[in-house]
Amino acid sequence: MSGRIVMGALAPHPPHLVYADNPKQNEPRAEGGWDVLRWGYEALRAKLKKKDYDVIIVHSPHWRTVVGHHFLGVPHFKSLSVDPIFPNLFRYHYDLKVDVPLAEAMCAEAAAQGLVTKMMRNEKFRVDYGTITACHMVNPDWDKPIVGVSANAAYDYFGNDVGDRQMIALGQAARRAVEKLGRRALVISSCSLSHRHFTTEPGVPEDMSYERIYNHNQYLWDMHVVKLLKTGKARELLDEMPDFIDQSVSEARAGSLTFLLSALGFPTQPAEVHAYGTVIGTGNAVVSWDMEAA
Amino acid sequence: MSVVRGYIVPGKPQPLLTPDAAPGYRKLADAFGMVREEIAASEADLIMIYSTKWLSVIGHQIQADPKPTWVHVDPEWHDLGEIPYSFVIDSEYAAAYEAAAKKRGLTARTVAYRGFPIDTGTITALKLLNPENRIPACVVSCNMYADRAETIVLGKAARDAAEQLGKKVIAVAVTQLSNRMVTEFIDPKTDRISSLKDDEWNRKVLEFLGNGRLEDVSQLARQFFREANADQRFKAIWWLAALMGQNNDYEGRVLAYEPIWGTGATVVSLNPMERGATNVEFDEDDVEVYRGDRNVLDR
């Protein structure tokens, strides 16, 4: 049995995007907002509708672990996720399934690579909002199981280069596990690009007259990264990743983007950029790679 | 005096969930127990917590749900089990704190949502210090971008609200000292501070605190953070020192200092009293009203 990663996507997780979409699972109601990013997700979902895949692997900065890389290891989670930072925007009732055999295979492959790993077996565990937001935006029907992977803090503890090395190994482990178990997988990186936030919020959070990039430096870095992705220069981006992280306060510091690029084998094909936009000052791009078109 | 006692406690769950997994965890749990007895014997009517484990971006968030109830599982230590909780929060104080913070120029808001994820540090502290909810509590977040001035103003606003309502407050800073965790799985019995340098700096800070020199520690916080990778830049100490009056007039006692997975975990008691180490420098800016970033680089 031989599986493959059929598609990869950069799927940023600001809860504002779910809030603005007004899905039935989310308690707060919005008058819209962040439309360009949401249109980008619409385009991504349209592509995914045509793809035959059976699992979503998601790496999320908001499940942060220090001791190893952790994997969701319970078949079913159902609970309420409240964003601790934006509780006014995100109180989401989730009901999701986990591909536990694939999670276990990824965990074993990563351990074989020398990474510290752990399965998360506690049924009362609340799945983080980064996982939920990204998965909702790519698949609001929740009709595919997921594999949730934590963001190890190696970047903070040892440095960006060490963090990247770990994420490269983790991405390779994911690819091997997918191939061994015969899965057709979508891999998503739940992260923003530049990540300096504004620390105030307008009275109406979706008032777009307040929305802009935090500073021009962030915009320039974001556009540089998008250009590298559009021109199939994932390896070059990896080379520049430590500087990108430091100079734009990038959320790539959580490892999600490097994990994705590694799982995809550092694609040389041009990525499809569906949207770029800001959310309370941070830079976000919705990007995909169709690995079967490569 | 609105603050009757101050405490520094660690935010990791081991003293609550696995106190007997290591001798150090037991010592910390016992120290929590000593504080619990002190609090019970006090005449306090509010436990005010600043937790480095509750991060915020949009200003400062203040817990105002009168009875937050949930079953918590720590994202890192999920194998140690669940923590069911139901706390009593002083909503009136929370609202007063929000107003006081805004009056001093800060962005602040109360939060009261069912299922709000109260952080592990707050839960551990309240479960161990106030298990019967005898004294109502309140919790404020740690803004990830806040600097010293902003955090000091946040502490002063907590004091304003307490004085306005006539509250007698137990102030609790939930923070590690050095915060460099061991990044592998270990037998807790072999737990130790992850570097000698961290250990030395922790002990230096604890020597100050043991002498009641809270304000001096507050002014050393930046250097301590640089040297020992202190938890969230050691902001909690700025908040605590500001709330307690920015002085060194305390009877300080270090009730425990032990490693938790390589980090420096301490339980410190600070009892306000007229005495002691006031003959020290107070050389940092003392800010009364927050007026935002000063943009010094633009001038």
Image: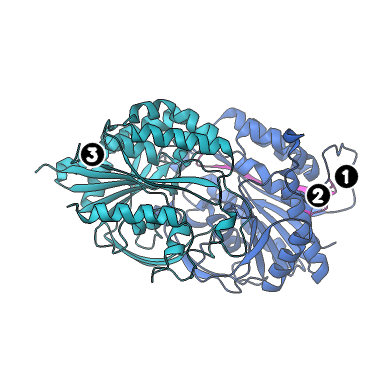
Chain colours: A cyan, B blue
Q: Is residue B194 left or right of residue A51?
A: right
Q: Tell me where residue B262 appears, x and y as whole percent.
A: 52, 38
Q: Tell me where residue B74 appears, x and y as whole percent.
A: 46, 55
Q: Tell me where residue A187 appears, x and y as whole percent.
A: 28, 46
Q: Which residue is mark 3?
A: A175
Q: Which residue is mark 1?
A: B276
Q: Residue at x 57, y 40 (%)?
A: B179
Mark 1 residue type = Gly
How many numbered callouts?
3
Q: Quadrant of the C terminus of chain B?
A: top right
Mark 3 residue type = Arg
Where residue B294 sits, quadrant-wise, is top right
Report the mark closest to the observer, 2 or 3. 3
State if disc 2 and disc 1 touch (CB < 8 Å): yes
Chain letter belonging to callout 1? B
Q: Which stretch appears magenta? A: B243-262
